[in-house]
Structure formats: C-alpha cells, structure tokens
Amino acid sequence: MPLLLGALLAFSGCRKDPAIPENPLAASAETGFHIPAGWPAPYYSFSENPLKPEIIQLGKKLFNDPKLSRDSTISCGSCHQPAGAFSQTGHIISHGVDGRLGTRNSPGLFNLVWHPSLMWDGGANNLETQILIPLQSHVEMEMSPQELVTRVSAQPIYQKAFLEAWGTPEINLARILKSMAQFEATLISDGAKWDRVQRRQASFTADEARGEKVFMANCAVCHKPPLFTDFAFRSNGLSAGVANDSGRMRINRNEGDKYKFKVPSLRNLAFTAPYFHDGRAATIDDVLKHYSEGIAAQPAPYTDPQLHNGIRLDATEKEQLKAFLQTLNDTAFARNPAFR
Amino acid sequence: MKRIRPGVLLLWIFILMAACRKQPDPIPEKAPLIDNGGIGLPGLRVQFTPTVNGAPLVLRSAWYRNAAGDSFQVSDHKYYVSNFTLQTDSGAVVKVPESYFLVDAADVHPREIRNVPPGTYTRISFLLGVDSARNVSGAQTGDLEQSKGMFWDWDAGYIMAKLEGFSPQSILSGSDFYFHIAGFSGRNNVLQTISFDLPTPLLVKAGEMPTLQFQSDVASWFSGASPFGFADYSSVMAPGPQAVAIANNYSKGFRLVRIDP
C-alpha cells in the first residue's frame, strides 16, 4: 500500500510541476482522440494545435463542405467517405471538379497522425499543409487558398463556428487548416478484431491464427503492425500502368525512387476497395494473385528487392491470409456516428 | 485478482519519475540566445529593395538585359528573408525570434524587428529563405501563411524566391519564364545565409529606429558561379541542382547599402 501511494504521488507530482506544459492530448474523452496501447508516439505534433471539441467539429464541417471546391461540387468528404473508412469505396479514381480524373485511388484516412508523410508519393510533410494539395489540385478541388479564406469568411455559420472554436472571430488559412487537421487527427481506427486480440478481448480462429503466421512471414516487414505500414516508399512490382505515374520520384526526382509509392495500411480493406495506388485491383484475390504469381510472370526492374520472386502462396495459405486480413477491418470505425 | 509485485511497482515509480524529468521545454526553438526581456524593447528596421544593375526593379514595363544578353521584363518577384541575428561589438549573438519577412517587389517597405536589446552591433546575418523547420511545421500565419503564392501544392514546402516574367529569348511557348526556387533539405537545400559587417557600429537604443537598407539584384540570378540564359532554362519549378545553382547565384547579389538613422 505505501508503494501504491508512492506511485500515485510520483504521478500527481508529475502533473503539478508548473514547468511542464499541459498535455495537449489530455482531453481524450471529449475529443475522441487517444493513443492506443502499444502504439508508437504520434508523428504529428499537437503542441501548436491542441485538440478542442469545437475545433474538431468545425474541422468536420469544413471537411464535408463542397464550397471548398472551385465550383462548390466537391468536398473532402466526397472522395473520403466515413463508410469507406474515408476512402471512396468502389471508385478506381474519384472525380474532381468538372468530372476531372487524376491518376490515383483515393486512400482511406485513419491513424493519420502516425504518418511521417502523406499522399501516395509522400508530397506532404504535415497533416495541416497536406490539405493544400487536393485543395489546389486541378483534378480535385481546384481552389486557391485566398479564395478559400474569402468563401469561408463570407458564411455567417462559419463566423459563429470560428468564434466558438478559436475564441476570436478571425478566419484565416492557418485556422482553417488546423481545424481540418484536428478532425482528421481524431480518425483513429483501433477497433478491429486484431486490436481486440492484442488487448486479450478476443482470440483468432484457427484459420485466422494460421493466416497471421503467413502474414508475419511474408507481409509484415512492409505492412508493419500495429499500423500495418512502415510508411516507406516501395515498388511492389506493378507495371507502370497507363498513367505511367512515377510516384515518389515525382517529388524527389530521384531515379531510384521511380514507381515507388507509400506502403498503404492494410487496415479496413473491407471498406477501401479497389486496391493499389491506381485502384487497378478490384478485390483482395486480385491483390494476392499479383504478389503470388504476377510479379514473377511480369518482372519489373524497379521492384522492391524483397519481392523479386514474388510471394508464393498456395490456395490454402491465401485463404488463411484473407481470414487474417479480415481481422483488420474496423467496422465500428466505418460506422462511427461521430464522423458523419 | 492478479497480485501486484512490489518490484514491478518500484520500476513503475522509477519510470514515471524519469518521465517527469524528460518533459521538454514548451517552445525551446523560439528562445533567443540572449534574454532580451520581452516586448517593448527598441528595435530596428530592415528594408530590402530588389534592383537590377543598381536601379530599383520596375515590374511589367521596364526592359532589362541579363549577362547572356537576353532582354526581359519581370512580372513578379518575391523572396523570403528570415532568422535575423545580430552580433554585438563584444561578440555576443542576438537571435531575433519570429523574424520572417516576405519581400515583394510590388510592395517594398521597411519591416520592423522589435525586441532587440539595447547595445552596439557590428554584424548582421539572415537566412535567404525559410528554415527547414518551418517548412514542415504545418499551417503558419503572417508572412508565412500558405496563401501568398509562395508554398507548393504538390511537394509541400516554401518557395524561397520567385522570379517570373517575359523574354523574347524564352524557350516556353508564351515567351514567359518562371523560376520558383525551393528545397530545404539535403542536396536540394537552397537556403543561403547572408552576413554583413556593418559599415558603422549600429547603436540600438530606446526612441530610435534605424533602418538597414539592403538591395538584392535580379541580374545576379543569371550570373555568378552558374551563369545561364533563357535558352538554357526558362523554367525551374522543382527542387534540384538548377535551383541550388540559381540560389547560389542570387545570394551573391545582396548588398547592405547604408544605415538610415
């Protein structure tokens, strides 16, 4: 008992030290943000953008507002829908203003604060400024930051919301971006069966357990738990495709990074089809076929060295792996009413 | 219920206490090297005037000639200066916190640097561009707000310097030229530190606001260690060796012309 008291004292002593800033993540019950047990520290720093429920709500409103696009037809939420784990289920390529098409599949948005870079090519180094990329893209929202501020400022509903959220009525680009980043920061997906198994609240079936072994032996180096990505840029041996998208090389002009894309998380695959950076794989079976047979059949010189021989899996292993991948689906996340 | 072992608890106490000590300072990177006592101290002004071959740059109407002999007009010219530091006659260095200025050829005016401790200064340095930290720190305000046409929308980061215009020698279809110089890390780093010994010691004291008059030279973009003409490049819009070479060129075009009282 004295020991327990000591522990409590040590803990409360920690909190009372005036030199220590208030933990910006402390209000997790109010904001919905939390760091799941066993996960690394988030990459995104909240120190200049402490979470606040009113700011998160404002961010959600902005995220879902089509006025953020040039012709007021496309919101962030058009291509990032809650039921699709914030991807656009069933769309190979989502359309932007005037029906324009880019070259990449709209990725799911979850656990973003752990990502050291964002976008398939890692072109964004911060959750806040990432927003400027789809916002200004000719094939997505085609909005200038200046026009964005003008438009948002003109809406009485935002004037009220900014005052409530930020304490003063000023509407500027930084507040818009930080609000949206706060909403995106709260998109935490840690409620899959896999997570419950880690928390000892559930256990794998025999097939899932065998699938986990297949996964750990063949996939986990790049799709590293618990986020199921190592955030690296890699080529998985896909052909260049119609768009001949050079991927990471477009950002750093490094020939060695040609056709490399950021390793996507394997969480929530049930909601994020189709797959790969350009959405060319309609189903998980198509994906597994590429790794198992496609890479060897059509070798591409830039393929990640670890995949040069593909990942040979027999039919049983594929089924077991699929059973395991199913355990990464977070239905509660895709149905979370707080995100709608 | 599982029994808690005292040894484990002791370990936890130790970990928690260690965690206490490891809390970082709230905003260490913004602390000046000398405690300058906060707001309200005297200061100074800096003014940056873009010129071409000695005369103030006139946008959109004046014709200029670069070292390659190409004639050109300038339609837009902006650059960032930041991270000002001052050195006293005793060698102490004062880092001016939050000093980020966007210089715009269309709107040349003096900028105030407040919070400078009274003293006699003999040297000034600044960064041509925006430090790497601010390139990766998300949404910014003031001159760094990402709505000034100086932040890339595909490879996030600041355009440190921009020169756009028109030249009959341009190899682009519209005879335009575009130089957006960016890149803040590794071999693509275009940041340049510029330092000047002051021609006369600068006395900073209450009630006075001396102005340091700087000039930059558009012609220097095209000359120096890596001279080029529009036939070589009419557009540099990505980080890389061309941007680094141009940044090296224009960094030599800065002059501290005089100090106005």
Image (cartoon, coloured by chain):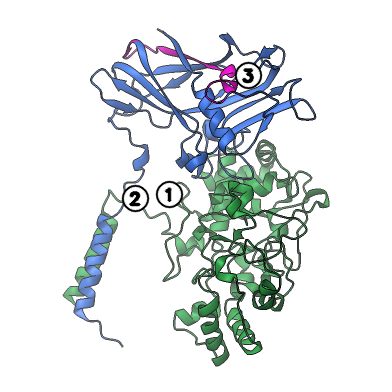
Q: How many marks?
A: 3
Disc 3: host chain: B
- Residue density around tag 1, few if under 14, some if 14–19, many if 20 or more, within 10 Å: some
Query: Given this view, does label 3 or label 1 mark the residue nearer the observer?
Result: 3
x and y, in percent, of residue B139 in the image: 54, 43
Chain identifier matching the blue colour in the rendered picture: B
Please tell me which residue is depicted at 20% across the width and 72% down the height of the picture: B10
Q: Secondary structure at mark 2?
A: loop
- Name the residue at 55% across, 83% down: A214
View extreme (right): residue: A98
Q: Is residue B101 visible?
A: no
Magenta span includes B186: no
Residue type beneath disc 2 = Pro
Quarter of the picture containing the N terminus of chain B is: bottom left
Which tag is nearer the camera, tag 3 or tag 2?
Answer: 3
Give the residues in magenta.
B200-226
Label 1 near label 2: C-beta < 8 Å?
A: yes
Secondary structure beneath dot 3 equals loop
Q: Which mark is residue A47?
A: 1
Q: A57 or B237, which lies in front?
A: B237
Q: Which residue is mark 3?
A: B106
Residue under numbered circle 2? A21
Please provide percent x and percent y for residue A26: 41, 59
State left or right for residue A251 relative to residue B169: left
Amino acid type assigned to the residue bearing label 1 in the image: Ser
Camera sees residue A203: yes
